[in-house]
């Protein structure tokens, strides 16, 4: 089975279990901090790569009432749930596609975002080249991920996931962006300062203390721009 097929199969299972919708609660706090750094125009054309059940697209479409938001995800079950949840939004659509084959015209979107998706991409370099293709000149890419090399508290996730992941550093992600043609590349951390309940239990962290340290390390935000 090819890598993309494995991803589709796994995240279809996630969709059926309702985990796509759970991502909003888990990631909203840090995503709002990222969105606060972005300037939006009412007619922006925005692509969300790895949109899952569509919750981020739902936030974005409210910021661009005269624009367009498109969510793509490799898992068709996620896309079906997103379409059902946001069927009333006329300037929002969802399509099933992998990051390395986005079915859209070149130079179309002026903003592209991806949250908690990039480390799953089978070929990050190919994915970034495809993102660069569909991004307008002077457009910007914003990637936000929790699983990266500098945050060792997230590394045990790799052994618990049913699909391969790529744990790269901020510098390594920036280098991949530069190789794809992006300029003004940089990376930063978005810290999650929310307190952790003392009785916290999860398969992803061994204790509340581990989760607290993970949040203190912060999520990795990687940005780049396409030249004029």
Image (cartoon, rainbow, N blue to C red):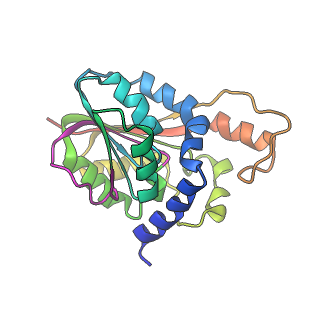
Residue at image coords 28%, 33%: 90
Vertical placement of 34 versus 103: above or below? above
Is 131 inside the magenta-drawn segment?
no
Residue 72 point in image, percent of width and height: 35, 49
Count of marks, rendered view: 0
Horizontal side of residue 125 vs 219, given as left or right = left
Residue 82 point in image, percent of width and height: 43, 45
* Residue 71 shows in this picture: yes
Residue 174 point in image, percent of width and height: 38, 46
Furthest residue to the right? Answer: 199
Q: Quadrant of residue 71?
A: top left
Vertical placement of 62 versus 20: above or below? above
Vertical placement of 75 versus 219: above or below? below
Q: Which residues are magenta?
A: 95-116
Residue at image coords 35%, 53%: 176
Image quadrant in which the N terminus is located: bottom left
Horizontal side of residue 208 vs 122, given as left or right = right
Residue 214 point in image, percent of width and height: 67, 41
Horizontal side of residue 97 vs 222, given as left or right = left
Residue closer to the observer: 130 or 8: 8
Residue closer to the observer: 104 or 39: 104
Residue at image coords 29%, 23%: 65
């Amino acid at each position: 089975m090819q890598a993309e097929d494995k991803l589709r199969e796994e995240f279809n299972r996630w969709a059926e279990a309702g985990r796509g919708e759970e991502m909003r609660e888990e990631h909203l706090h840090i995503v709002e901090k990222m969105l606060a750094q972005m300037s939006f125009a009412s007619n922006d054309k925005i692509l969300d790569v790895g949109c899952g059940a569509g919750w981020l697209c739902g936030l974005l479409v409210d910021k661009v009432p005269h624009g367009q938001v498109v969510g793509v995800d490799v898992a068709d079950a996620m896309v079906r749930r997103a379409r059902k949840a946001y069927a009333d939004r006329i300037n929002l659509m969802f399509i099933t596609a992998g990051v390395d084959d986005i079915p859209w015209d070149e130079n179309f979107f002026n903003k592209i975002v991806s949250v908690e998706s990039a480390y799953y991409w089978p070929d990050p370099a190919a994915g970034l080249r495809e993102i660069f293709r569909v991004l307008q000149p002077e457009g910007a890419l914003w990637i936000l991920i929790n699983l990266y090399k500098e945050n060792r508290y997230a590394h045990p996730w790799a052994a618990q996931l049913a699909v391969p992941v790529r744990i790269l550093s901020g510098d390594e992600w920036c280098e991949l962006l530069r190789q794809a043609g992006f300029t003004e590349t940089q990376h930063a951390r978005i810290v999650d300062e929310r307190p952790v309940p003392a009785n916290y239990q999860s398969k992803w962290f061994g204790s509340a203390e581990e989760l607290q340290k993970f949040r203190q390390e912060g999520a990795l935000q990687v940005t780049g721009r396409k030249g004029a």
